[in-house]
Image (cartoon, helix red, strand yellow):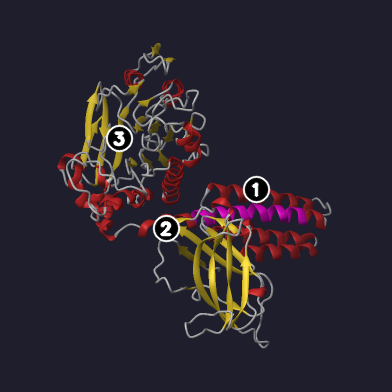
């Protein structure tokens, strides 16, 4: 097994004059060739993204240590290796197959490892050392490249070329079983692996049919099929490796889940009734890597650790994700990130994209149930001055489709194209989960590129989403209950807000659904975002609740028979109930806030169990509503 060495540019637990000791994971031997050195580069606990064509390099000297415990030109021989893009294997990892020239003599390698761009400019550089042992002629020196277990299986398959008839058939069946066992050993219980195995099985069946039908199987036939097998199996193993590696990376964000969250999370886990539909719901994390902003500047002095309160949003997402194995789904309900405070809007957008990518990667790799990311007003990066409020500076719908994997439909959910809004059925629990995009406004611009609509200040819904809601998402199987999530509260329920567009249409559709209104036609009043839709509901439907965030507070209201429930922010810095008093909760279980929501369809009940802020208050700790 190849050991992966992890180097984090923000977590060097060494002094500036020291070097990383790699010898526990890697050493060389004189005479070895193609020696695999696998390194994972991280930034703040997250995988390096290898932008701008970065490739790995290793350079230094091999020889004797001097009085400073280093090897220099005076005591060693210079060696170097510069990789290519082929060395980059994904999720922050590189695999360098080092040539024998890197191990010219016995001694210690001492030098530098890192990444450089195509111009040779070095970034992310680390001082490292490891041993190079003597290539004693009495010892076995392996000059062949490293062969993984999968490669050994493929090597074995090549020997089948020299077998014929029934011997070939028996040997090929044995080889197939060994491949299957290898894939099962890495715990690859993912759809892509099963698909791959099915494809391999089909190819094997075809080869065995040739034998059975006495049709001569040529060496060319076998070579072609073995090449196909190798590609398919490599893809499957890469999928498993990336998922396993992603889980490791995500749980290591900023040190992972702190010890003080242990008891609250264990207690929350014990509350989950797996016989009901269970949703983990977190909102308004406002993960931000570049701000010390004080939302309550008039009432309190900014504490020195204010940046930590914002930056901890990514780490806190792990709390909810750690319970995902007991949940049917997880929703991060928008304002997942905040806008970093950069004076340069171009750099600000780059940082915002990185924040979004960090949050999405953490969610998708650490969750053991379907996880959905909604967008809020802060996620759009549209809190800009009039001059800078352009489409080029915004996070666009196209960006969200990629960042939140909407185009991939990872969990078989239904979307309208690559929309942020979706629905997903859970047939065993008889629940349909619907996510609405409450910042669905046109991305039209004026002649100078300025955005006509500001998604930071205005929430709204366009005709395609409203038509989809009425004529697709709410066409629910009999006996189901519907649970809706959206970032901003629907105007006229928990809030009254003039800065909203077509919220009245959403409210009308939902009320018509629960009342079974047929033959309906609605026309919007906003001529800039026009709506005209027709729909019909032939039976009365059940809505368990419409769950929202955005206001950083807790609240609930039942309006025309529908429960509207608000959950406060995870963000420690911006709690609208406690305000600056919550700042002191950083470093305690109350620094976070999320709900476990259970839907009991048979008894028409919905329950909210709070973890974090609000759990200390009976008003919010456990809420229950009939529907």
Question: Label 1 near label 2: C-beta < 8 Å?
Answer: no
Residue identified by numbered label 2: 45
Q: From the top left corner, tell me how far across and down residue 609 is, in percent.
A: 25, 43
Image: 543 above or below 534: below
Q: Is residue 148 visible?
A: no
Residue at horizontal 44 percent and vertical 74 percent from the top: 18
List the single residue furthest toward the left: 618
On the rendered structure, is 174 left or right of 401?
Answer: right
From the image, which quarter does the C terminus lie in? Answer: top left
Q: From the top left corner, tell me how far across and down residue 339 is, in percent.
A: 37, 41
Residue at horizontal 39 percent and vertical 44 percent from the top: 342
Question: Label 3 near label 2: C-beta < 8 Å?
Answer: no
Magenta stretch: dominant SS? helix
On the rendered structure, is 153 left or right of 332?
Answer: right
Q: Secondary structure at mark 2?
A: loop
Residue identified by numbered label 1: 199
Q: From the top left corner, tell me how far across and down residue 376 is, in percent.
A: 37, 35
Residue at horizontal 34 percent and vertical 23 percent from the top: 541
Decide which of tag 3 and tag 1 comes sooner along the chain: 1
Q: Secondary structure at mark 1?
A: helix
Q: CA distance from mark 2 to mark 1?
A: 37 Å
Q: Residues within 10 Å of mark 2 (few under 14, many from 20)?
A: many
Q: From the top left corner, tell me how far across and down residue 283 is, in percent.
A: 32, 40
């Amino acid at each position: 097994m190849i050991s992966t060495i992890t180097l984090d540019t923000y977590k060097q637990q060494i002094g500036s004059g020291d070097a990383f000791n790699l010898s526990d994971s890697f050493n060389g031997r004189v005479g070895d060739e193609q020696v695999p050195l696998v390194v994972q580069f991280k930034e703040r606990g997250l995988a390096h993204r290898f932008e701008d064509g970065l490739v790995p390099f290793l350079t230094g000297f091999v020889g004797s240590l001097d009085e400073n415990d280093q090897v220099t030109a005076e005591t060693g021989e210079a060696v170097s290796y510069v990789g290519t893009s082929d060395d980059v294997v994904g999720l922050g990892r590189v695999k360098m197959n080092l040539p024998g020239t890197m191990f010219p003599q016995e001694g210690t390698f001492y030098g530098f490892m890192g990444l450089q761009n195509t111009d040779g400019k070095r970034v992310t550089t680390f001082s490292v050392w490891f041993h190079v042992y003597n290539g004693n002629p009495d010892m076995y020196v392996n000059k062949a490249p490293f062969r993984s277990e999968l490669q050994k299986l493929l090597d074995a398959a090549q020997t089948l070329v020299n077998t014929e008839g029934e011997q070939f058939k028996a040997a090929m069946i044995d080889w197939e079983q060994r491949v299957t066992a290898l894939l099962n050993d890495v715990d690859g219980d993912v759809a892509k692996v099963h698909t791959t195995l099915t494809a391999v099985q089909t190819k094997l069946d075809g080869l065995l049919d040739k034998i059975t039908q006495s049709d001569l199987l040529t060496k060319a036939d076998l070579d072609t099929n073995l090449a196909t097998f190798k590609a398919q199996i490599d893809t499957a193993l890469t999928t498993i490796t990336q998922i396993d590696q992603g889980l490791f990376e995500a749980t290591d964000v900023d040190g992972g889940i702190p010890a003080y969250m242990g008891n609250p999370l264990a207690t929350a886990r014990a509350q989950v009734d797996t016989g009901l539909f269970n949703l983990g719901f977190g909102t308004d994390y406002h993960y931000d890597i570049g701000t010390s902003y004080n939302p309550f500047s008039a009432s309190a002095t900014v504490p020195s650790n204010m940046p930590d309160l914002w930056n901890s949003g990514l780490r806190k997402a792990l709390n909810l994700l750690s319970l995902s194995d007991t949940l049917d789904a997880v929703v991060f309900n928008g304002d997942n990130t905040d806008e970093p405070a950069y004076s340069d809007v171009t750099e600000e957008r780059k940082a915002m994209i990185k924040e979004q990518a960090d949050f999405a990667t953490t969610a998708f790799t650490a969750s053991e149930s379907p996880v959905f990311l909604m967008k809020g007003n802060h996620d759009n990066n549209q809190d800009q001055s009039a001059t800078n409020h352009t489409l080029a500076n915004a996070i666009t719908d196209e960006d969200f489709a990629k960042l939140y994997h909407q185009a991939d439909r990872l969990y078989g959910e239904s979307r309208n194209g690559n929309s942020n809004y979706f629905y997903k059925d859970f047939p065993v629990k008889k629940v349909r989960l619907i996510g609405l995009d409450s910042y669905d406004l046109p991305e039209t611009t004026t002649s100078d590129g300025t955005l006509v609509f500001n998604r930071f200040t205005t929430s709204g819904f366009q005709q395609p989403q409203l038509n989809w809601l009425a004529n697709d998402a709410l066409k629910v199987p009999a006996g189901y209950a519907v649970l809706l999530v959206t970032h901003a509260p629907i105007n006229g329920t928990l809030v009254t807000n003039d800065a909203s567009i077509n919220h009245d249409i959403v409210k009308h559709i939902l009320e018509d659904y629960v009342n079974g209104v047929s033959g309906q036609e609605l026309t919007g009043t906003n001529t800039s975002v026009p709506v005209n839709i027709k729909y019909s509901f032939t039976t009365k439907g059940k809505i368990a609740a419409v769950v929202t965030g955005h206001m950083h507070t807790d609240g609930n209201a039942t309006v025309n028979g529908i429960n509207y429930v608000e959950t406060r922010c995870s963000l420690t810095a911006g709690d609208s109930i406690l305000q600056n008093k919550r700042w002191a909760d950083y470093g305690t279980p109350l620094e976070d806030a999320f709900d476990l929501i259970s839907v009991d369809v048979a008894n028409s009940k919905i329950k909210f169990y709070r973890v974090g802020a609000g759990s200390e208050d009976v008003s919010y700790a456990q809420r229950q509503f009939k529907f």
